Amino acid sequence: MKKLMTTLVLVGMFFISCKKETKTADPETAKTPDTVKVEETAAEPVLDSAAQMKAWQDYATPGNPHKLMADEVGTWNCDMTFWSEPNGKPEKATSTANIKMILGGRYQEANYQGTMMGQPFEGKSTLAYNNASKEYTTTFIDNMGTGMMVAVGTYDEKTKSMELKGDMVNPLNGKKTPYREVYTIVDPKTRKMEMYDVKNGSEYKSMEIVMKKK
């Protein structure tokens, strides 16, 4: 880890030193028209090597949010409900999720298997907490399409829920549409995931998954 951190710090210092270099421009080409207003930007503070090392270590070290994700390691039975349109007839499906932590406890990976619309269903999700941005990012892929869903959000300790927002491509018209996901810790062995899509300019609940830990 120390070798990795040292390498990252050296790379960062290299780029910082490159930014410090200035080139002498041709006075004629360097002139700024009177009508153009040049805005001054404050220079970013340059950290010494020890501070850079600490920053990278903090970024790479799993913390409490990662422990929260690790609490879900195990096998879960998923009761899935879908709505294709607002107030539409619900469709049911079931699946099993096997959740584990990967890459030294830094990320959560879930593998889903089940049946959907009479067809075998397989899906994979990842969940990350970025120590630098203080945000969660989730991704999802499955055998029912060829795209990847990506959403970003935060966790509310009061409601024990995570709200994530992203965009997905509608296969019917090829256009991006926003979606919202709410993931709630109901109790130690129960989770609920609700997904909201947008149709005709209005948001509606399109999916709900109730997960029970075996």
Image: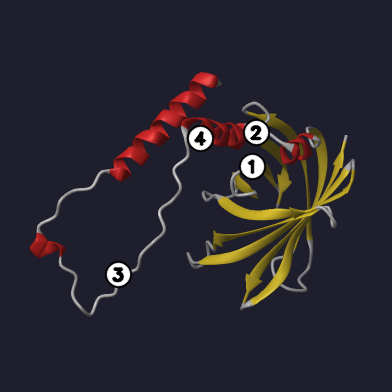
Q: Amino acid at mark 3?
A: Val
Residue 195 drawn above or below residue 58: below
Residue shown at the point (68%, 36%) measured from the top left? 108
Taking the image as shown, residue 179 lies to the left or right of residue 76, namely left
Count of picture labels: 4
Which badge, 4 or 2, is on the more N-terminal residue?
4
Mark with earlier residue (4, 3): 3
Q: Given the image, on which type of amino acid does mark 2 rest? A: Arg
N-term-proximal mark, 2 vs 3: 3
Query: In front here: 102 or 7?
Result: 7
Dot 2 surroundings within 10 Å: few (below 14), some, or many (20 or more)? Answer: many
The residue that disc 4 covers is 52
Label 2 sits on residue = 106
Q: Which mark is residue 180?
A: none
Q: How far is disc 3 from disc 1 in space, using C-alphas?
A: 40 Å
Amino acid at dot 1 = Ala
How far across and down, in percent of the image, does residue 89 sit?
Answer: 78, 68
